[in-house]
Image (cartoon, rainbow, N blue to C red):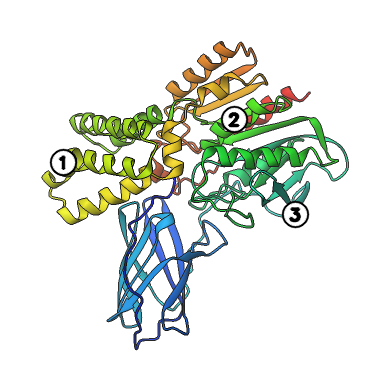
């Protein structure tokens, strides 16, 4: 899953307006694969300046502060640089008619006073209460970061001692259910495993839901300390067998799990669900190619963009100073990318805005760390049993190349307890998919393939016998 991109600051002064726009404004974003409700709550300070928060209930129950807001002459503009978001709309008949932009990708969004209701997607795998197992909301502390993390612990029965697994989310800010596009993969996975006799701890990412901390500046190494704190917390629970606690990570979470296991030999097992084992720059080159090809991009353009991306990733690996890196990236994009876009009729000002957005994102702490990081060495230190699964329609983590990298790491480490499997017909979210394209994620009713669920549970039970 991708990180939210950074955004240009709006640099707009806050001004007074005769029109009262305070209070909540509601709208719905419609895009290939689903819909998201948006609520922007605007307040006015005594100084006459505006403040606001934005809530996306399908993604998180927690509203995000709007850091830049401007309203004048019936024009509303606001931005959330940390999430790569900006909005501009004109007030007409008490409705803002406007455009919502994230990562340079623009979608129409009208905001009105009437709350929007979206017909819920059919998600037949989501369990219904009452659950046939014990559930508890928990809080545990990451001592290294000085923050409390909130999650849900599910145990087959309140009494007894059980093996357990910590679930680690993929990239992007996600809650304990790894919720996205109306799906709750970790809710479905936790439910299935707990019914099979395995306790599960899943938790909100730092700065998300009920967890403390700041998400925007954190890297995979920071998230690894969160996962390690979850692992250590389970050791304090009387219901958990302290010698049979493992980790299961999806996507970036599958990169984090080996980091934790390499430093904690008492981790009983790890499960890598499309977990990356390829260096970040190589992974992104493959991802960009596969996604572009799936979208019908000509081979000539794919080759050209691949060459540009190689220059970009080399710069990220070579430059450690952020300002120097940004300057070098601007030079690359100005020379290589701008002429390509302009030749396709994209207005110059839009090209420059896109470039600025991309440069800020590429130079961010998380992305730079991701490109520079090679998961291989950590995986080579892991001596516990490893299960690595990929769907053969995964367009985000190249399945064959990724599983081959995991096999090579196992050979180097001498770990004979590594199992890799390529699951036919499954995408990056382990849904049964026609093309594997992210645009399908929200439209597919299935949240998690029963075949994949069975593979995971059966393997874990074998390890903890």
Say if mark 2 contacts mark 1, CB within 8 Å.
Answer: no
Say if mark 1 contacts mark 3, CB within 8 Å.
Answer: no
Say if mark 2 contacts mark 3, CB within 8 Å.
Answer: no
Q: Which residue is mark 2?
A: 259
Q: Tell me the element at label 1.
A: helix
Q: Position of residue 116 (x, y in %)?
A: 46, 70
- Seen at 42% across and 54% down, the residue is 34
Left or right of 199? Residue 105 is left
Left or right of 30? Residue 169 is right
Closer to us: mark 1 or mark 3?
A: 1
Q: Earlier in the sequence, mark 2 or mark 3?
A: 3
CA gap, disc 1 to disc 3? Answer: 57 Å
Dot 2, crowdedness within 10 Å: few (<14), some or many (≥20)? many
Q: Tell me the element at label 3.
A: loop
* Vertical order, 2 against 461 (above or below): below
Q: Quadrant of residue 458?
A: top right
Q: Earlier in the sequence, mark 2 or mark 1?
A: 2
Q: Which residue is mark 3?
A: 130
Q: Which residue is mark 1?
A: 340
Q: Position of residue 152 (x, y in %)?
A: 70, 49
Tell me the quarter of the image containing the C terminus: top right
CA gap, disc 2 to disc 3? Answer: 36 Å
Dot 3, crowdedness within 10 Å: few (<14), some or many (≥20)? few
Q: Earlier in the sequence, mark 1 or mark 3?
A: 3
């Amino acid at each position: 899953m991708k990180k939210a991109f950074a955004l240009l600051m709006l640099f707009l002064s806050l001004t007074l307006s005769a029109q009262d726009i305070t209070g909540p404004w509601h709208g719905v974003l419609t895009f290939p694969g689903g819909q998201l409700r948006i609520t922007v709550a605007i307040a006015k300070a005594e100084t006459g300046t505006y403040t606001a928060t934005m809530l996306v209930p399908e993604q998180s129950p927690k509203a995000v502060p709007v850091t830049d807001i401007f309203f004048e002459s019936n024009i509303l503009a606001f931005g959330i640089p940390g999430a790569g978001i900006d909005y501009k709309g004109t007030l007409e008949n008490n409705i803002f008619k406007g455009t919502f932009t994230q990562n340079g990708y623009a979608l129409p969004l009208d905001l009105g006073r009437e709350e929007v209701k979206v017909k819920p997607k059919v998600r037949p795998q989501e369990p219904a209460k009452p659950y046939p197992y014990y559930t508890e909301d928990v809080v545990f502390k990451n001592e290294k970061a000085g923050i409390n993390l909130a999650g849900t612990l599910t145990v087959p029965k309140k009494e007894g001692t059980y093996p357990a697994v910590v679930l680690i989310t993929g990239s992007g800010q996600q809650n304990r259910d790894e919720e996205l596009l109306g799906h709750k993969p970790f809710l479905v996975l936790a439910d299935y495993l707990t019914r099979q006799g395995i306790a599960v701890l899943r938790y909100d990412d730092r700065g998300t839901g009920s967890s403390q901390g700041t998400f925007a500046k954190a890297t995979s190494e920071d998230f690894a300390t969160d996962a390690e704190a979850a692992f250590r917390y389970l050791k304090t629970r009387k219901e958990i067998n302290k010698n049979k606690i493992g980790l299961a990570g999806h996507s970036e979470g599958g990169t984090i799990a080996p980091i934790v296991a390499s430093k904690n030999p008492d981790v009983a097992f790890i499960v890598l669900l499309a977990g990356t084992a390829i260096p970040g720059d190589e992974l992104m080159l493959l991802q960009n190619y596969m996604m572009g090809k799936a979208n019908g991009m000509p081979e000539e353009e794919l080759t050209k963009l691949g060459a540009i991306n190689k220059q970009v990733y080399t710069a990220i690996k070579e430059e450690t100073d952020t300002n120097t890196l940004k300057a070098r990236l601007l030079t690359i994009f100005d020379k290589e990318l701008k002429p390509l876009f302009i030749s396709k009729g994209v207005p110059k000002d839009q090209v420059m805005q896109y470039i600025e957005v991309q440069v800020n994102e590429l130079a961010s702490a998380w992305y730079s760390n991701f490109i520079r990081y090679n998961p291989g060495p950590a995986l080579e230190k892991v001596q516990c049993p490893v299960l690595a699964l990929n769907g053969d329609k995964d367009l985000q983590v190249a399945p064959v190349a990724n599983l081959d990298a995991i096999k090579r790491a196992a050979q180097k480490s001498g770990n004979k307890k590594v199992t890799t499997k390529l699951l036919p017909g499954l995408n990056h979210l382990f849904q049964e998919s026609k093309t594997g394209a992210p645009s399908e994620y929200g439209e597919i009713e299935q949240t998690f393939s029963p075949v994949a669920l069975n593979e995971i549970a059966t393997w874990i039970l074998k390890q903890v016998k």
